[in-house]
Every structure is written in C-alpha cells, then in structure tokens.
Amino acid sequence: MKCNWCDQIAAKEIMDSVFWELPSGLRAIEIKATPTICCEACSMVYQQDEIVEEIEDQLMLIKSDELPTSITYRELMEIPKLLKKNYFRF
C-alpha cells in the first residue's frame, strides 16, 4: 500500500487506538481497534479520510456526551443514529 505522506509502498493497514475530541469539545475519548494506516518507511500512523469522516459523522449523529471514555470503533459505529445524515457536512 502506498503511504499518503512519503509516497513509498511501505504502508499497511492495522487496527490501533485513536483519541477523538467530542463535538461538544468538553472531553475526548479513546476509540480502540480503529482502522489505521502505518508506514514502515516514514513511521507515520494515520487514518484514511473515509474513516475520519465516518467517525466525525457518527459522533455528530449520536448522543456522544453519554459515551464511555473508551470504546471500540465497531461499537461506536453500531450506536443508533438520531438523524439519518450529518446535515452540517456539505
């Protein structure tokens, strides 16, 4: 897989923990087992844009202030949404 940062073919997909600020800005949570890209050439660790968008949309569409301090990516994505889509995204 090609790394978005160094353009080397040294990136691979892993599952890793990320820390995300909730939309309220009052606290952050740990999202465990999140699809992540890790590059062996430049050591960059990042999430693809689609994953970032999914997390941000989900946090906007659920009662995020009620989330525990740590949750898995899959558990987060399985929480029922209050709205069908994020109307703040163009």
Image (cartoon, grey):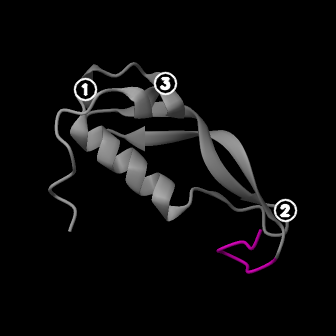
Where residue 10 sits, quadrant-wise, is bottom right
What label sits on residue 65 in the rendered view? 1
Marks 3 and 1: in contact by CB < 8 Å? no
Q: What's the amino acid at mark 2?
A: Glu
Q: CA distance from mark 2 to mark 3?
A: 27 Å
Q: Nearer the viewer, residue 18 or 9?
A: 9
Taking the spot 16% from the left edge, 58% from the top edge, the residue there is 88
Marks 3 and 2: in contact by CB < 8 Å? no
Taking the spot 52% from the left edge, 31% from the top edge, the residue there is 74
Name the secondary structure under disc 1. helix
Where residue 4 sits, quadrant-wise, is bottom right
Query: From this viewpoint, which residue is outermost toward the bottom?
Result: 7
Dot 3 corresponds to which residue?
Answer: 71
Magenta range: 1-8
User: Counting residues from the N terminus, which is met first, the one under dot 1 or under dot 3?
Assistant: 1
**Viewer can see residue 62:** yes
Name the secondary structure under disc 2. loop
Q: Please say whether residue 14 is one of the residues in the magenta stretch.
A: no
User: Counting residues from the N terminus, which is met first, the one under dot 2 or under dot 3?
Assistant: 2
Taking the spot 25% from the left edge, 26% from the top edge, the residue there is 65
Q: CA distance from mark 1 to mark 3?
A: 13 Å
Query: From this viewpoint, which residue is outermost toward the front?
Result: 84
Q: How many badges with numbers are in the image? A: 3
- In the picture, measured across the screen, residue 5 lies left or right of residue 74, that is right
Dot 2 corresponds to which residue?
Answer: 40
Q: Position of residue 42 (x, y in %)?
A: 79, 69
- In the picture, measured across the screen, residue 10 lies left or right of residue 60, that is right
